Amino acid sequence: MKKATGFTLLLLALLTLSCGNKKHDAAYYEQMVDSIRRAEQIKEIQKQTSMNVKPIEAWFDSLRLRTLPIQTAGPEIERIGEFVSVPAPANEHFGYPADAHLKAMALPTIYHRQVILLCEMKDSITPSLFLYTMDKQHQPIDMLNIYHQESVSREKDNGMTYDEYYITSHYEITVMRYFKGQDADKPQLEEARRYTISKDGMFEEQPIER
């Protein structure tokens, strides 16, 4: 209502000027009115855009904090803590389409950078876990896959590969890949990698002492 009243007063003022000033015709003032209308429309669009961004920021800020250390939980991610569903508009912040089924929790910051533990549900029972470092605009800096499992067919044996992981309170991240054959009693360690997070927010592989 206030906008309409203000616009009417402005229109009357322009008409008054047009009566006292013969240098400008009606078309001139119509262009002025159109410019004012466009400016108001732009302000409204900017306001709506700002409102759309704020809920995403609020969601990131509302994530529950999970303290370190964290030990592998296999596919039973509820043992780690309470994950929160990622809203569809926030999926793109992790490089996923809007229809992806994602869950997340916040980990302690490092070098003033946000760290997110993201869970992608391939189906109702198969999760994959990723660590993300984020910038101030909640955009990913780097990503590290710490848990994934899949069935594999090999020349001599079929079975499953899966990861175990451990994250210390100083963000020393160890990821071990295992293979367990169908007829094997114990899984076989295939590789182990260790990572730290640099001041730039990048995951850097470190040598493992043997």
Image: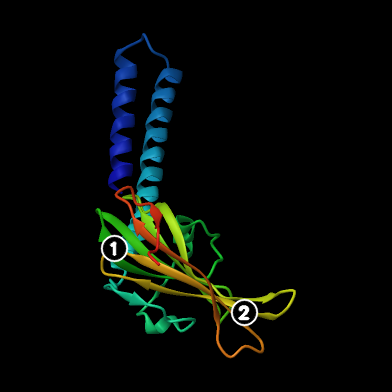
Residue in the picture at 32% in, 36% down: 8
Residue in the picture at 26% in, 60% down: 109
Please, is residue 210 above or below residue 45 in the view? below
Label 1: few (<14), some (14–19) or many (≥20) C-alpha neighbours in 10 Å: few
Q: Is residue 27 left or right of residue 62?
A: right
Is residue 175 in view? yes
Residue in the picture at 40% in, 28% down: 35
Q: Nearer the viewer, residue 4 or 52?
A: 52
Secondary element at tag 1: helix
Looking at the rendered structure, which numbered label has been put on residue 61? 1
Residue 122, by quadrant, is bottom right
Q: Is residue 153 left or right of residue 74?
A: right
Q: Nearer the viewer, residue 58 or 27?
A: 58
Say which label, 1 or 2, has the lower sequence index. 1
Indicate the position of residue 48 as horizontal and vertical percent values.
39, 50
Residue 25, by quadrant, is top left
Looking at the rendered structure, which numbered label has been put on residue 144? none
Indicate the position of residue 133 as horizontal and vertical percent values.
37, 57
Q: Quadrant of the C terminus?
A: bottom left
Label 2 sits on what residue type? Met
Q: Is residue 45 left or right of residue 156?
A: left
**Residue hosting label 2:** 160
Please, is residue 158 above or below residue 197 in the view? below
Is residue 102 in view? no
Secondary element at tag 2: strand
Alpha carbons under labels 1 and 2: distance apart: 37 Å
Q: Is residue 40 left or right of residue 129?
A: left
Indicate the position of residue 116 as horizontal and vertical percent values.
37, 64
